[in-house]
Image: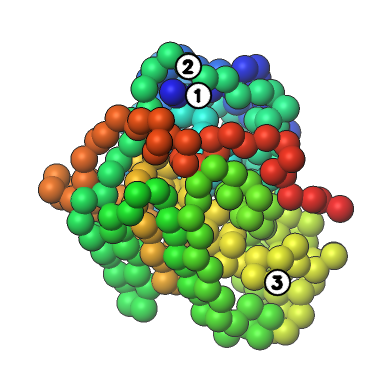
């Protein structure tokens, strides 16, 4: 069955790039509604922005969606990952600015908020996108691929010159609460040189070593160090989880990312939906449904934040 929140979940914080305070309220929505943002600071006629792959517009540093009136919401990937990882299919997200709050740089504050608000089933069948044949897109040394699998699986690898990151690879089946347990608390990351360059250009004004893992060569500058020894690749998987949920339904398939980012994952979804023989929409039965990301998630799945 489809799922939504039992009550509102409210999040207050700064936008990562603009550095301005924002309030976001994730509200229950009826079955079949999907995930939709509503900008409360613009006229109602132009306020709704769908969280869908075909509403994504080019952005260097995050996932950004835009409606036909040009109204935008940016940095949506972490809240989308949390919705996917908690199996919340329907929600109205009211936000009073153009950017989702960064909070601690991971998805775990959103997961905590959703579990506190409660998640409830709805009398409607879940539809999922079953991948029928491989689809792959490349840009230089980066690639993203979808291929058939019974559940959502993910294989991601990264390679950075910084000694504190280096080469990392991780493979997971994202059934049940795996996202919440293994990925949700992994934070966005960057190099100190990147932070300096972005701030010189008026970006990352809300970024600190408290809401991003900052690397400088072989050093981790963020207090407390890493939450996982391979936190960067886990965060890349978190981002991909959120970007894939913009398909509009859960995906039954294996995603492979090699140095992939937001833009390449969106390019992959566009390639998938441009190939009608590569996918089909299926009703999710009980056997498959119990293995979807987020089904059966509860507070005990949350990683320790001590």
* Label pair 2/3, CB-CB below 8 angstroms: no
Residue 143 appears left or right of 93: left
x and y, in percent, of residue 241 in the image: 48, 50
* Label pair 2/1, CB-CB below 8 angstroms: yes
How many numbered dots are placed on residues in this image? 3
Which element type, helix, strand or loop, lies under badge 2? loop
Which residue is under mark 1? 3
Mark earlier in primary sequence (2, 1): 1
Q: Nearer the viewer, residue 6 or 148?
A: 148
Mark earlier in primary sequence (2, 3): 2
Q: Residue furthest left?
A: 277
Which element type, helix, strand or loop, lies under badge 3? loop
The quadrant holding residue 49 is: top left
- Label for residue 229? 3
Residue 279 appears left or right of 65: left
Q: Residues within 10 Å of mark 2 (few under 14, many from 20)?
A: some
């Amino acid at each position: 069955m489809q799922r939504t929140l039992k009550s509102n979940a409210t999040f207050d914080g700064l936008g990562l790039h603009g550095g301005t305070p924002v309030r976001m309220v994730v509200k229950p929505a009826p079955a079949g509604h999907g995930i939709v943002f509503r900008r409360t600071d613009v006229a109602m006629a132009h306020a709704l922005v769908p969280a869908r792959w075909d509403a994504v517009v080019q952005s260097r540093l995050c996932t950004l969606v835009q409606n036909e009136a040009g109204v935008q919401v940016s940095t949506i990937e972490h809240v989308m990952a949390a919705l996917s990882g908690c199996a919340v299919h329907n929600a109205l997200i009211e936000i009073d600015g153009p950017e989702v709050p960064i909070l601690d740089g991971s998805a775990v504050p959103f997961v905590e908020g959703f579990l506190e608000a409660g998640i409830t089933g709805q009398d409607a069948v879940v539809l999922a996108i079953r991948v029928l044949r491989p689809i792959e897109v490349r840009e230089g040394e980066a690639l993203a691929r979808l291929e058939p699998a019974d559940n959502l699986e993910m294989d991601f690898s990264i390679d950075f010159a910084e000694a504190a990151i280096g080469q990392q690879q991780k493979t997971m089946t994202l059934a049940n609460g795996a996202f919440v347990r293994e990925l949700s608390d992994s934070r966005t990351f960057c190099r100190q040189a990147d932070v300096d360059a972005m701030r010189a250009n008026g970006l990352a004004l809300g970024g600190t070593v408290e809401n991003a893992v900052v690397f400088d060569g072989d050093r981790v500058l963020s207090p407390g160090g890493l939450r996982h020894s391979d936190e960067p690749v886990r965060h890349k998987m978190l981002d991909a989880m959120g970007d894939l949920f913009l398909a509009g339904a859960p995906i039954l398939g294996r995603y492979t990312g090699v140095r992939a980012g937001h833009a390449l994952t969106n390019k992959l979804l566009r390639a998938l939906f441009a190939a009608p023989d590569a996918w089909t929409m299926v009703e999710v039965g009980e056997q498959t449904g119990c293995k979807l990301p987020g089904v059966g998630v509860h507070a005990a799945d949350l990683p320790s934040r001590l």
